[in-house]
Image (cartoon, helix red, strand yellow):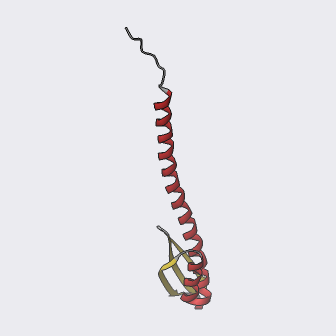
């Protein structure tokens, strides 16, 4: 009669743990990439809105591009007392951010 032991069980268990770690790492890399794109989009939108108030749309587009993004929306309104209100949306990767600025 053959006796069964637990010998050799570490290899399949180790392979399973490594596989789970690889899947978890892959998922976290995607989340981290999205977070980086969102942060870059916010920075680019803020910079583009400020540049747009003082230098117009061309300046906003140039600054958004230098931050790795592109202007996807531009809304400019005349506020009270000669103040301009500007709202800009910028896309970086899969993330889009919106920023507003006011100026004369």
User: Where residue 18 appears, x then y in whole percent?
Assistant: 50, 39
> Which residue occupies the foreground of this view, 103 or 31?
31
Up-down: is 3 above or below 63? above
> Count of labels shown?
0
Q: Residue furthest top?
A: 1
> Which residue occupies the foreground of this view, 27 or 17?
17
Up-down: is 85 above or below 23? below
> Which residue occupies the foreground of this view, 72 or 100?
72
Q: State which quarter of the image contains the C terminus.
A: bottom right
Up-down: is 94 above or below 14? below
User: Where residue 61 appears, x then y in whole percent?
Assistant: 54, 83
Q: Residue furthest bottom?
A: 82
User: Where residue 51 appears, x then y in whole percent?
Assistant: 61, 83
Q: Is 27 placed left or right of 84 in the picture?
A: left
Q: Residue at point 53% right, 60% down?
A: 33
User: Where residue 56 appears, x then y in whole percent?
Assistant: 57, 89
Q: Residue furthest left?
A: 1
Q: Residue at point 48% right, 83% down?
A: 75
Q: Residue at point 45% right, 16% down?
A: 5
Q: State which quarter of the image contains the N terminus.
A: top left
């Amino acid at each position: 009669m053959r006796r069964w032991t637990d010998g050799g069980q570490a290899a399949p268990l180790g392979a399973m743990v490594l596989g789970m770690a690889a899947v978890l790492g892959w998922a976290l890399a995607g989340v981290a990439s999205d977070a980086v794109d969102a942060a870059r989009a916010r920075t680019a939108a803020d910079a583009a809105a400020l540049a747009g108030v003082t230098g117009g749309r061309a300046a906003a587009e140039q600054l958004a591009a230098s931050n790795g993004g592109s202007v996807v929306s531009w809304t400019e309104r005349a506020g009270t007392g000669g103040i301009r209100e500007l709202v800009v949306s910028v896309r970086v990767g899969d993330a889009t951010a919106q920023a507003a600025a006011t100026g004369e």
